[in-house]
Image (cartoon, rainbow, N blue to C red):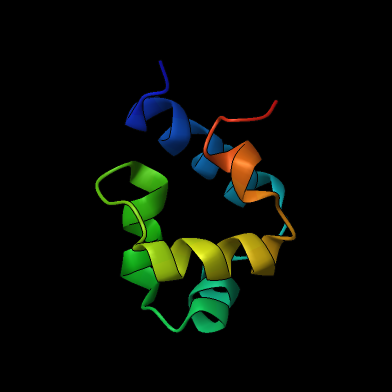
Amino acid sequence: MITVDQIRQRLIFEIQSSGISQREIAIGLGVSEPTVSQYMSGRAMPSLETFANLCKLLDLDPSYLLCIKD
C-alpha cells in the first residue's frame, strides 16, 4: 500500500536533487518560498494543481512521485 509519507519522501528527494533553488521553484509554481519550505519539511503537501505543475517544472513522471512506478 502506498502511503502519503512515501510520496512526501520522494517529493522532498526530487526537489533537493533538482538543483533548482526553493526560490526558483516557488516562482515557477506561483507559490511563496515558505510554502515550498513547508513541502520540504513535510508540514504540507502541494495541491493537485501545484503537484502537476511541479512535475512539469522538474520534468518528473507523476506516477513516479506518487510511488506507482519506480
Residue 64 horizontal side relative to residue 35, left or right? right
Q: Is residue 51 in sight in this rendering?
A: yes
Q: Is residue 13 above or below residue 59?
A: above
Residue 63 horizontal side relative to residue 27, left or right? right
| Camera-side residue of 1 and 37 | 1
Q: Residue at x 52, y 74 (%)?
A: 23
User: Quarter holding the N terminus?
Assistant: top left
Q: Residue at x 44, y 69 (%)?
A: 50
Q: Is residue 37 above or below residue 26?
A: above
User: Quarter holding the C terminus?
Assistant: top right
Q: Residue at x 27, y 51 (%)?
A: 44
Image quadrant of residue 48? bottom left
Residue 28 position, x and y percent, is 57, 80
Residue 56 position, x and y percent, is 67, 67
Image quadrant of residue 47? bottom left
Residue 35 position, x and y percent, is 32, 66
Q: Is residue 20 in sight in this rendering?
A: no
Residue 58 horizontal side relative to residue 27, left or right? right
Q: Residue at x 62, y 60 (%)?
A: 55
